[in-house]
Image: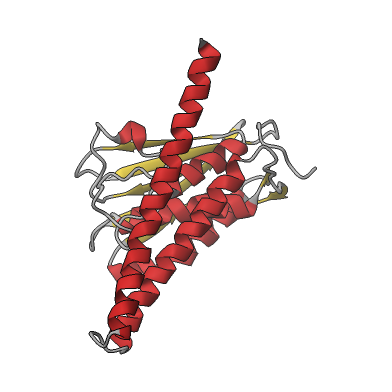
Amino acid sequence: NAMADGLQNAERQRRNMVADVAHELRTPLSNIQGYVEAVRDGVLDPDAGTMGTIHQQVLYLAELVEDLRLLAETEAEDFRLNREPGSLVEAVRASVEGVRARAEAKGVGLEADLPADTPPIEFDQTRIAQVMGNLLDNAIRHTPSGGSVTVSASVEAAAATITVADTGEGIPSDVLPYVFERFYRVDPSRDRATGGVGLGLTIARQMVEAHGGSIRVQSAAGHGTRFTFDLPLADDGPGPSNE
């Protein structure tokens, strides 16, 4: 019975995944088709505005496909981490500086409360940069002008802890348990331009857990959000490495 239930659940998840992907692909493809047909029929001129709209939809598709590729990669049985000794703090600092211009353009303060010197640890710098990119992207997107995003880090005897906290709109308590699920959006009406497709946090969780770590969220509607993830200092995580 347990095996049958497991197979049914796996099949249900597969169908839901296919349906979600089809839904996400259908909207931008329909938009592109509509604009191209309107230009072909002479209803719209192929001016900068029309081409800009089409280009935005193409970018949406490209980002969606990349997110799907990353998700499939992290869930594959042969997913490998390229662990190398390095400074986690410096990797986090580089991620923060990489989004500083975007935060300033939106009027969001960006602060990094990072220790000056920490021992090197073994981690996949590319994967952790992707985790940080997702968390910082969410924080800046959901923080209004005049708000702030703060990134902090600490290294203890057994683990390194990174926190990304914002003063944004927050997440209602009843949906907090679902924010790491595939294609889940706090506001279902949001699209890629405002709220993403709902895969970034799923990918972040997969990458952190591949390191043997964990990720969690604290939030309240109207009171900001805090994402925290831990990476064990010892190389004892479940994900295989390149060594």
Q: Nearer the viewer, residue 180 or 217?
A: 180
* Placement of 51 over or under 201, stated as above or below: below
Residue 108's spot in the image, x, y percent? Answer: 30, 63
Percent across and percent down for residue 172 are 23, 37
Residue ranking furthest to the left = 222
Q: Is residue 143 left or right of residue 63?
A: left
Specify the quadrant that holds the C terminus.
top right
Task: Give the residue displayed 38% in from the left and 37% down from the top.
Answer: 217
Q: Residue furthest top?
A: 1
Q: Position of residue 216 (x, y in %)?
A: 42, 35
**Along the line of sight, which residue is nearer the eye, 111 or 51?**
51
- Give coordinates of residue 118: x percent, y percent: 62, 46
Q: Is residue 130 visible?
A: yes
Residue at position x 41%, y 38% in the image: 16
Q: Is residue 185 left or right of residue 15?
A: left
Q: Quadrant of residue 58?
A: bottom left
Q: How many marks?
A: 0
Q: Is residue 45 above or below residue 87?
A: below
**Residue 231 in sight in this render:** no
Q: On the rendered structure, is 220 left or right of 16?
A: left
Name the residue nearer the viewer: 46 or 128.
46
Q: Residue at x 27, y 67 (%)?
A: 107
Question: Looking at the picture, does residue 135 appear above or below residue 63?
Answer: above
